[in-house]
Amino acid sequence: MSKKYHYNHAIHNKKACDYIDKDGQFNDWVITTSFYTALQFVKADLFPILIVEPSSSKTYNTFDDFYNKNDRNRKSKHESLVDLLHEHRPNISSEYECLCDLSMSSRYKNYKLDISEVKKAKKCLAIIEDDCKPTIEADLEKH
């Protein structure tokens, strides 16, 4: 998937998140859509990516390309993306990891979440969006 696709998907998810948030009854889905919005922003921001190894370097155009060549048998896709962010985007990695954890919790442990967790998720998303969006938009203008 292209940078433009991931960016447009992020914008779409953000609209859905904001719409669901207005109702006030579905905190689990606000958190989940916040996470998936962030996921699309970071994929648009990170890729293509040049990975430099001691013996070689390779450009990966998509996350799936990177994952299939590197982590497919060892880590989940979510873990692999968190690791990439820690290495290449440490300024937003903790917010992304927090959103990932909140989303997993809301989907698999407890869907009844407090408004404070929604606020935390929305704050993490805002930090990620504010960091990624200008770079993505500048890249899209070039092409």
Image (tube, rainbow, N blue to C red):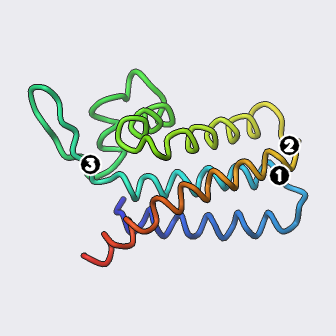
User: Is 123 placed left or right of 133 in the picture?
Assistant: right
Would you say the residues marked 2 and 1 are in contact, meaning their CB atoms lie under 8 Å apart?
yes
Q: Residues within 10 Å of mark 2 (few under 14, many from 20)?
A: some
Q: Whole-percent x and y of residue 43?
A: 42, 53
Disc 3 designates what residue? 49
Q: Which label number is shown at residue 27?
A: 1
Q: Residues within 10 Å of mark 1 (few under 14, many from 20)?
A: many
Q: Whole-percent x and y of residue 17?
A: 70, 63
User: Is 56 placed left or right of 28 in the picture?
Assistant: left
Q: Earlier in the sequence, mark 3 or mark 1?
A: 1
The type of residue carrying mark 3 is: Ile
Would you say the residues marked 3 and 1 are in contact, meaning their CB atoms lie under 8 Å apart?
no
Q: Label 3 to label 1, Cα distance in Å?
A: 34 Å
Disc 2 designates what residue? 113
The residue positioned 38% from the left and 66% from the top of the image is: 136
Q: Earlier in the sequence, mark 3 or mark 2?
A: 3
- Image vertical order of residue 7 relative to residue 127, above or below: below
- Image vertical order of residue 12 relative to residue 75, above or below: below
In depth, the one of 81 and 92 nearer the eye is: 92
Residue that sits furthest to the front in the current view: 91
The type of residue carrying mark 1 is: Asn
Q: Secondary structure at mark 1?
A: helix
The type of residue carrying mark 2 is: Leu
Q: Whole-percent x and y of residue 66?
A: 30, 40
- Image vertical order of residue 21 relative to residue 103, above or below: below
Q: Secondary structure at mark 3?
A: strand
- Quadrant where the image shows the C terminus: bottom left
Q: Secondary structure at mark 2?
A: loop
Q: Label 3 to label 2, Cα distance in Å?
A: 36 Å
